[in-house]
Image: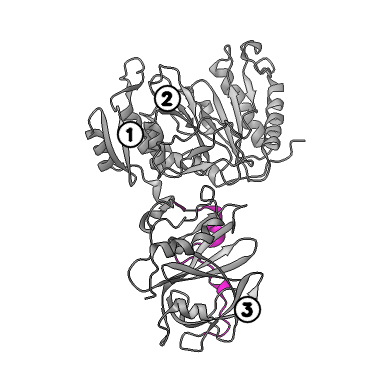
Amino acid sequence: MAPTRTKSGREETLDEYRSKRDFTRTPEPSGDGGGPEPGAPLFVVQRHRARRLHYDFRLEIDGVLASWAVPKGPTLDPKARRAAFHVEDHPMEYADFEGIIPAGEYGGGDVIVWDTGTWQPAEGVDDPGRALAGGELHLDMYGEKLRGRFVLVRTGNDSNRERWLLLHKKDEFAKGGWDPEEHPRSVLSGRTNEEVKADPDRMWQSDQPPARAAVPLKAAADPAGDDELRELDELRASGGTWHVFGRELKVTNLDKVLFPGRPGEEPVTKRELLRYAARIAPTALPYLRRRAFNMHRYPNGAEEKGFWHKELPNHAPDWLPRWNNPDADPGETQTYLVVDEPAALVWAANFGALDWHAWTSTVDHPDRPTWALVDLDPGDDTSWEDMLALARLHRTALEHVGVRSRPKVTGRRGIQIWVPIAPGPDFAATRAWVEKLSRTVGAVVPELVSWKWEVKERKGKARLDYTQNAVNKTLVAPYSPRPAPGAPVSAPIDWTELEDPGLRPDGFTIRSIVDRIAERGDLFQELLDHPQKLPSLD
């Protein structure tokens, strides 16, 4: 195996890698997790669609991944000579990085692990690092796609980068005409770059060692298990350490009443809220992931006045995902919680967040919404039947223009309609579209609707609020509790449920919604797979 550098040497060789990346924005590993594992040295080849498609060819040497960009990709064809450009060393944790580097960041694009395995220097190569410094390395590769004897040869410099050639020797593994593009799938997930781009299934927690750095997003589909919930139940009233979703959470004041009970019902304690958060987190996560999270905190319970808490506090655990807003002005929130893993939502609930709000744009493109929102805000004189009438009119209008959408009761008095949109239009364009749609609806029932901003000027009428379509403005997230008696939940509903005489805006609670999901499923889920362009309303 190649000799391992000292820790200081490893840190020094990663300086260029780190200097090119903002780890508050990119999910790539920072290299803080440790060095190589014992055993034969690793190699990885990543298919990387950045400004141009290329393959990143990486060899474990001296405790890091020595790296080359190979535009046409490695091949088993012994007649082919592949140009390779030496780039900065990468950390060992990068060996199984697969996902999306945000646009605007260095190397922005989608990445898959195209091949991986082990390698050995060829006979007579005692020190691979020294061989590379000398400009030529012969090696044997043992991958799923790449096998046999390869040679790297330095040929010169190009724009301050070393030019190399990568070629395959004529041996038993050589195959004439072998094209890497005919083998496009990841050996890690079995998916193509397109599939990873459309639906990334992992994120990175770069502060973790390699074995725990990659957090599966899809694998988080299971709620907290019986053992985890039992551990919560057995904690004393004052709290303790709860092991949930692979994290250690310090939870406190578990028997504190956070929601008063409804008539004939017991009040809801903090322990029950944490249990709910742990059970609902995997279902709620798709609507929170990669989004700045605004916490409406009620540390003394829903009967006391709450307050908005957006800045992630300094005492928050280091493992919590977060985002530093590069556009924040002095005095504005700089660092937001990002609920990229289920334990983060449980942490927020323990922090007193009874109301969960996430931005309608992602941290990757904060000025480009992925949801268009219609907020049916009742006035003092608006009846529930009036609200249903307004929702049905919007349903008809949206169906008429061929737009897929779903309603959601707010858990208080209102109804919201969420429309998934493909990234592209900015908030101003989205807001203008929703305004035009709602003004068309409002013209049908002017007796029910006011366009005045001030509540007292609306004379008890409802407002069709399109102004929530703006950066840093939010509506309550699907499945969020609401600070009211009984802990009602903002629950997605089917359009047909608008005809159900038993439907109420606050009819679902943290005690009933999990069973409803088990029976009906997540009624917003289909929206996640159908981003759409907003059609012209002219």
The quarter of the picture where residue 41 lies is bottom left
3D distance between C-alphas at marks 2 and 3: 67 Å
User: Is 51 positioned to the left or the right of 278 in the image?
Assistant: right
Image quadrant occupied by the N terminus: bottom left
| Start-end of magenta stretch | 175-204
3D distance between C-alphas at marks 3 and 1: 61 Å
Q: Amino acid at mark 1?
A: Arg
User: Is 309 positioned to the left or the right of 1 in the image?
Assistant: right
Q: Amino acid at mark 2?
A: Pro
Q: Amino acid at mark 3?
A: Gly
Q: Earlier in the sequence, mark 2 or mark 3?
A: 3
Q: Residue at x 54, y 51 (%)?
A: 22
Query: Residue at the front extreme?
Result: 8
Locate residue 43, reporting x and y percent.
45, 71
Q: Secondary structure at mark 3?
A: strand
Task: In the rendered view, tell whether residue 116 sits above or below residue 392.
Answer: below
Residue marked by disc 2:
488
3D distance between C-alphas at marks 1 and 2: 15 Å
Residue marked by disc 1:
275
Task: In the rendered view, tell whether residue 127 sits above or below residue 463.
Answer: below
Closest to the camera, between mark 2 and mark 3, is 3
Residue marked by disc 3:
156
Foreground residue among 24 and 351: 24
Foreground residue among 366 and 444: 366
Closest to the camera, between mark 1 and mark 2, is 1
Q: Secondary structure at mark 1?
A: helix
Closest to the camera, between mark 3 and mark 1, is 3
Whether residue 236 appears in magenta in the rendering, the answer is no
Report if residue 296 is visible in the image: yes
Q: Residue at x 43, y 36 (%)?
A: 314
Whether residue 200 appears in magenta in the rendering, the answer is yes
